Image (cartoon, rainbow, N blue to C red):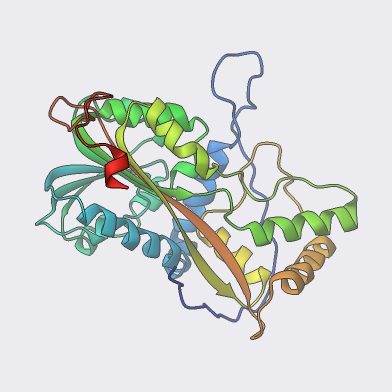
Amino acid sequence: MRFISSIFRHIRHTRAFAAISSTSPPPSMGTVGPYQVFDRNTKRMQRDRAALADGREKSKTVDYLREEVAERMLERFLDIKRNFATIVDLGSGPGHFTKLLETNKVKTSIMLDSSEPTLERDPDSDFEVEVKRIHADEENLLESIPPNSQEAIVSCLSLHWVNDLPGTLIQIQKALKPDGLFLGAMFGGDTLFELRTSLQLAEIEREGGISPHVSPMTDTRDISNLLARAGFTMLTVDIDEVKVGYPSMWELMEDLQSMGENNAVIGRRNVIHRDTLAAASAIYKGMHGTEDGSVPATFQIIYMIGWKPAPSQPKPLERGSGKVSLKDVL
């Protein structure tokens, strides 16, 4: 496991997340479709605000997490001995993964993201490969990308905000050409477990109950099944962790807001009492604090690789066709 060096900054004022109003309609309970966990409009507004003029420079200072995951994802991408004319960077943000690409591997990257200010944050001069930008909803990929049209689709830390993950994976599979590659990285279920447990214990102590403040994440055991159900073959799934040190819980929460990663769960409480937050900060430091006074935040990352089926792909031999007995090998 590798660790990002602890990041220490001083801030003049500590504060909780600001409440953000939403114009998204409430989920309809009488219709058939994916269960709505996240308010996608609120999430878009949060990310827009983080990337607009007042927050642009701050958002660049908190790129450290996505840059680290993008580098680890690139290592897996480079292990694939194939060059690509065009790839789609789904939920690209300002292009953390695309910025790492070189023209001897990829010629053009199509960056697609639901937040236009985030998508347009960084100029073309920051990229070695040619970039094309599409402002569109990641949940409706096939509205922007035709079926059977792409050599590869990658996604770096965006799928954890998708309501219908199985449906989105199916759309990715349909958008790929036969033998096309999907490479993704998303947060796993143990992400920010320190913050989650501290807030829950503080709310039980101060308010006699709990409400969701950290978004639910996909269980790592489900990813392989979801990829197989979406029609991918030759699956590879592995898990890694990134740990970041902060002076206290307050700096962690401020950075999550600047990343556009604050809470967007439907039915969430917009305001947390300050005494509850103060109690959560003390619990966080007491349960998870280190000897140097910092507190760790764990980000569990699930990396996944899948291929769209094609006749040219290697296939397993038929059962019973082996010519060597395992008894002889062992």
| Residue at the left extreme of this rendering | 104
Q: How many marks?
A: 0
Residue at 43% from the left image edge and 37% from the top image edge:
224
Residue 130 visible? The answer is yes
Asked if residue 47 lies left or right of residue 24, the reply is: left
Q: Is residue 266 above or below residue 259?
A: above
Asked if residue 89 lies left or right of residue 229, the reply is: left
Q: Is residue 266 above or below residue 80?
A: above
Asked if residue 135 lies left or right of residue 87, the reply is: right
In the depicted view, which residue is nearer to us: 262 or 308?
Answer: 308
Quarter of the figure that contains the N terminus: bottom left
Q: Is residue 40 above or below residue 146?
A: below
Q: Residue 136, how many percent across, how many down?
A: 36, 36
Asked if residue 8 lies left or right of residue 269, the reply is: left
Residue 137 visible? The answer is no
In the depicted view, which residue is nearer to us: 293 or 313?
Answer: 313
Residue at 46% from the left image edge and 38% from the top image edge:
223
- Dividing the picture into quadrants, the one containing residue 85 is top left
Residue at 68% from the left image edge and 75% from the top image edge:
13
Q: Residue 215, how many percent across, how many down?
A: 61, 46
In the depicted view, which residue is nearer to us: 222 or 90?
Answer: 222
Q: Is residue 59 above or below residue 88?
A: below
| Residue at the bottom extreme of this rendering | 292
- Dividing the picture into quadrants, the one containing residue 198 is bottom right
Q: Residue 102, how many percent across, how many down?
A: 15, 59
Residue at 66% from the left image edge and 18% from the top image edge:
29
| Residue at the front extreme of this rendering | 328
Q: Residue 36, how many percent across, how many down?
A: 59, 29
